[in-house]
């Protein structure tokens, strides 16, 4: 019995180790999106997000450091530009990507909302964000090209009430999807 338990623990450990070493860049079809912390003093690179196609939709694999800890709104925005305007940092990215003109913020799996509405992104206490996010409404990488990927300060309730666009805060980190 002890041999079976030991073998089971060993096999599970090997499977976990193999799983935790998954590198999305080894996928034939992937996009690497460089992400910059937005600042009036000049943007600073904080890492990258790798996007791959899966049978369930596009998966985003963040590898970010220096992110404010907590939960953050995470969206694909209309324009492939992270520049500032007189209204604020990252405003050249436009609004949430909404090719169907839904004009409604919603859950990532709800087709009645913006196509760019993604699950929230989590950064740990050390400011590391590396948990993958699945976007079931987005099926191909080609759909993403020419847009931007945005991380907002604060969470996202995936509704327009009580505050519009999920109640998230200012635009914090942005990357152009090429």
Image (cartoon, helix red, strand yellow):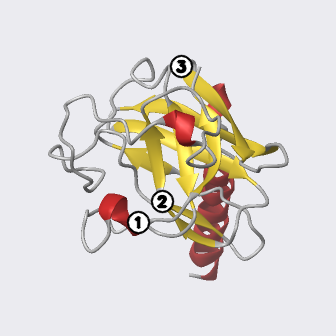
Q: Is residue 27 visible?
A: no
Residue at the bottom extreme of this rendering: 2
Sort mark 1 into few (<14), some (14-19) or many (20+) by Cα contacts within 10 Å: many
- Vertical side of 107 occupied by 1: above or below: below
Report the quarter where the C terminus lies: top right
In the rendering, which numbered label is found on residue 156?
1
Left or right, residue 172 beside residue 91: right
Name the residue rendered at 45%, 26% in the picture: 144
Task: Give residue 73's mark.
Answer: 2
Residue 166 seen in the current view = yes
Query: Is tag 2's residue or tag 3's residue first in the polypeptide sequence?
Result: 3
Q: How many marks?
A: 3
Determine the secondary structure under disc 3: loop
Are the residues tagged 2 and 1 within 8 Å (C-beta)? yes
Q: Is residue 127 left or right of residue 25?
A: right
Q: Is residue 146 above or below residue 164?
A: above
Neighbour tally class for label 2: few under 14, some 14-19, many 20 plus, Cα within 10 Å:
many
Residue 55: image location, x then y, percent: 33, 33
Farthest residue to the left: give it.
112
User: In this image, 79 relative to 130: left or right?
Assistant: left
- Specify whether 78 is left or right of 9: left
Of 148 and 31, which appears nearest the observer? 148
Q: Earlier in the sequence, mark 1 or mark 3?
A: 3
Location of residue 31 in the rendering, given as x and y in whole percent from the top left corner: 59, 25
């Amino acid at each position: 019995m002890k041999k079976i338990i030991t073998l089971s623990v060993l096999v599970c450990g090997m499977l976990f180790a193999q799983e935790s070493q998954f590198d999305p860049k080894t996928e034939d079809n992937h996009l690497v999106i460089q992400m910059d912390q937005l600042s009036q003093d000049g943007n600073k690179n904080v890492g990258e997000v790798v996007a791959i196609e899966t049978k369930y939709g596009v998966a985003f694999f963040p590898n970010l450091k220096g992110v404010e800890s907590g939960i953050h709104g995470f969206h694909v925005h209309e324009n492939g530009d992270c520049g500032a305007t007189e209204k604020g940092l990252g405003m050249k990215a436009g609004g949430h990507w909404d090719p169907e003109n839904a004009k409604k913020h919603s859950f990532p799996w709800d087709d009645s909302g913006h196509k760019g509405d993604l699950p929230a992104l989590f950064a740990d206490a050390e400011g590391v964000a590396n948990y993958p996010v699945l976007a079931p409404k987005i099926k191909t990488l080609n759909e993403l090209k020419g847009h931007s990927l945005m991380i907002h300060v604060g969470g996202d309730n995936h509704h327009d009430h009580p505050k519009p666009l999920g109640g998230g805060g200012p635009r914090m980190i942005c990357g152009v999807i090429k």
